[in-house]
Amino acid sequence: MNCKPGDLACVVRVPQSEPHIEAILREQLIGKFVRVVRLTVGSEGALDAWKILEPVRITLPAGRGTGTMIIDLFGIEDSVLQPVRGVPVHDEQLDEVPA
């Protein structure tokens, strides 16, 4: 498990798909930040996904030049997320020499 409930997470990869769709998803999803709420366990063979606080809207081709589909994602697989957790902060510069 990458995330914990309440984590802010960044989408760092997309699930494997048809190459054209995967490229579109990479363009629209990688770098997006989401707040994960709770883990939803998939049925047999399905991957665990996080319910997210606010849906992410993506646009995909509808097929054969007939327009586009707008899809709101309400959950994202744990495997594509990287949680953003606190970075250690130092009050002093460690490379400074005291006077």
Image: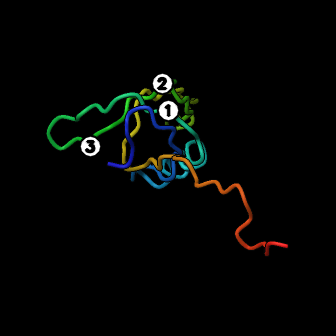
Category of crowding for the residue at label 1, using alpha-carbon neighbours closer than 10 angstroms: few (below 14), some (14–19), many (at least 20): many
Counting from the top left corner in percent of width and height, residue 32 is at 58, 41
**Residue at image mark 2:** 53
Q: Which residue is mark 3?
A: 47
- Disc on the earlier residue, 3 or 1: 1
Earlier sequence position, callout 2 versus callout 3: 3
Q: Nearer the viewer, residue 32 or 19?
A: 32
Q: Secondary structure at mark 3?
A: loop
Would you say 23 lies left or right of 97 here? left
Cβ–Cβ under 8 Å for marks 2 and 3: no
Residue with the most extreme left position: 44
**Residue type at tag 3:** Leu
- Between disc 2 and disc 3, the foreground one is 2
What is the spatial separation of the Cα atoms under label 3 and label 1, in whole angstroms? 19 Å
Q: Which residue is mark 1?
A: 35
* Rendered location of residue 8, percent (x, y): 51, 38
The secondary element bearing badge 1 is classed as strand
Specify the amino acid type for callout 1. Answer: Arg
Q: Residue at x 46, y 37 (%)?
A: 7
Residue 92 lies, with reference to residue 36, above or below; the image says: below
Q: Depth check: give the residue in front, 20 or 14.
A: 14
Q: Kindly check if marks 2 and 1 are in contact, taking CB atoms under 8 A apart as contact.
A: yes
Residue at image position (53%, 30%) is 56
Query: Gap in Å between the C-alphas at discs 2 and 3?
Result: 19 Å
Q: Foreground: 26 or 18?
A: 26
- Name, please, the residue furthest toward the front: 99
State the separation of the CA atoms marked 2 and 1.
Answer: 6 Å
